[in-house]
Amino acid sequence: MNKSTKVIVEVAIMISLAFIIELIFSVIPGLIQGGRISISLLPIVVVAWRRGIVPGMVAGLLFSLLNMYLLDAYNPALLLSWGLSMNDFYASVALDYLLAFSLVGLVGVIRIKLGDSLLNFIYAVVIGYAIRFTMHFLSGVIIFDAFAGDQNAWKYSLVYNGTYILPSAILAVIVGIAIYKRVLSQLDELL
Amino acid sequence: MNNIIIGQYVPGTSFLYKMDPRSKLIALFVFMISVFIIKNLLHITILLFAVILILRIGGIQIGRIFKGLKPILFLLSFTFIFQLLFVKGDVEDILVDANVVITSINIFIFIGFFILWRLLRKVVKFRFLLFITFLVGSIIMFINLTPGSPLFNNPYNLVIYKQGLEGAVFIMTRLIVIVTMSTILTLTTKPTDLNLGLEKVLKPLKIVGVSTEIMAMIIAIALRYIPTLLDEANKIMLAQASRGVDFSEGKFKDKIMQIISLLVPMFIISFKRSDELADAMEARNFVPGKRRTRIHLLKWTSVDTILITVSLLTLSGVIVTRILGW
């Protein structure tokens, strides 16, 4: 990890910004087994975009922890009362929170490899959401397949997670364009 | 927006508040392992009473714990009923074997019960308890009071086995113990103290190259800046509102414009704040990864040692009883 003070502080403040966005979006009612429309991934993508892969992954990881502990109050009792086991809880924490958010930091590679442009930033946002979707999708297939009922678990997970990830991603791209044009591309003059 | 409470911390003065977050974290972890080793209803009940005793001595109102249980209450009762009805055991272990008969007369008594429940619901404080009483009372009534002619040809045969009842009570008790224990930790420890405790407890991770100090630093700054940035968001919203933006109404397209008009300044403010904070920290000689002195030091007292000892004794006791099969 790049140990400069600026990176550490920026990661921290972007985590709080992501948290606040999540808080503002929490007025939108979510689905029963978790998941709601939110563009809180945007600050994480911005950190990865500006500071590289490792700070982005750290930001995603710590944000997921704060989110899990403070906002969602995700606990084993919830899953146990749904008839799942303790191992399911650990797997769900790993997939739905830790991996789903920290792997988003990987989009930092886009700016390093492809260069700094609006189109590449949009790619980064879309790929960030795609990574998150993949993790939630896998968790739906592996852990929550019991909720699928008669349907195919793959189809169930695709539909369930798609209903909130897809609108979130579209919204995040729209807002992301504004953020890139008005903030990221002229940050040196703004500060 | 100002009265959002982050975390569950409630100020207090009992011994639970004065304890070291490190010992609380370790003890919680050890107790959790014990809970999942226990397979015996009697043992988990003893643990439940121990937890209630800690609550009483620690001066935490039991109502607060119930608040934590409330969101999962429905699912809890669902699991309970599921266990009760569908777990089968030996024939000699049948507790209840009765026919639920709905007749032309007792259905009216049921409607009376229903109206009584709906009326009482508005006055009584423990609504959930009332609902359970209503449900169980109705079922008992359907079993015992069967004058008149049955409405359906095949009465439902209600069979409850001893194993089903034991399993249901066991799962309920285990869940309550888990939730109560973790709620005690979050009720009595500030998020910042918890963070500091985690930093110390997870220090061994340094061997695999993870710097817990930097992680803890990031979480500390993030927690510190959540209220500040919330305040800024509030200011921006008020400023936009004074220019005529209505955040509560508008079409979908307007909503997106509102989100953008909120988030663009939020991003700029965040970048400015982080730049200023980094400069301020560097001016005070902050070097990442180097040893720092602290204003708040964690104090390990005798109570902490006692708690850790008790938790370890519990764990070893649980393991011994499990192996011996008591």
Image (cartoon, coloured by chain):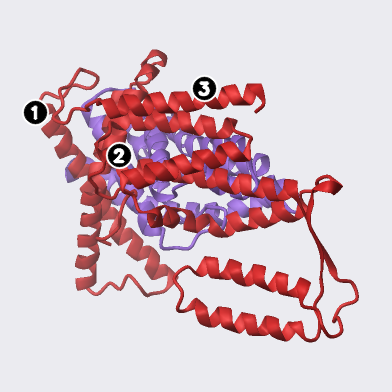
Chain colours: A purple, B red
Specify few, some or many for label 3: CA neighbours under 10 Å numbering under 14, 14-19, or 20 or more. few
> Of marks 2 and 1, which one's residue comes earlier in the chain?
2
In the rendered image, the quadrant that contains the C terminus of chain B is top right
Tell me the element at label 1: helix
Tell me the element at label 3: helix
Give the residue displayed 40% in from the left and 50% down from the top. A71
Specify few, some or many for label 1: CA neighbours under 10 Å numbering under 14, 14-19, or 20 or more. few
Residue A10 in view (yes/no):
no
Give the residue displayed 80% in from the left and 79% down from the top. B146
- Which kind of residue does numbered mark 1 sit on? Ala
Residue A142 image position (x, y, % from top left): 66, 39
Residue B165 image position (x, y, % from top left): 69, 50
Judge if badges 2 and 3 mark residues of a common chain. Answer: yes
> Of marks 3 and 1, which one's residue comes earlier in the chain?
1
Residue that label 2 marks: B16
Q: Which of B159 and A164 is in front in this view?
A: B159
Give the residue displayed 59% in from the left and 33% down from the top. B38
Give the residue displayed 45% in from the left and 63% down from the top. A28
Please report, as a chain letter, where disc 3 is located: B
**For this view, does B311 lie left or right of residue A9?**
right
Residue that label 1 marks: B283
Residue B316 image position (x, y, % from top left): 51, 22
Residue that label 3 marks: B316
**For this view, does B278 lie left or right of residue B210?**
left
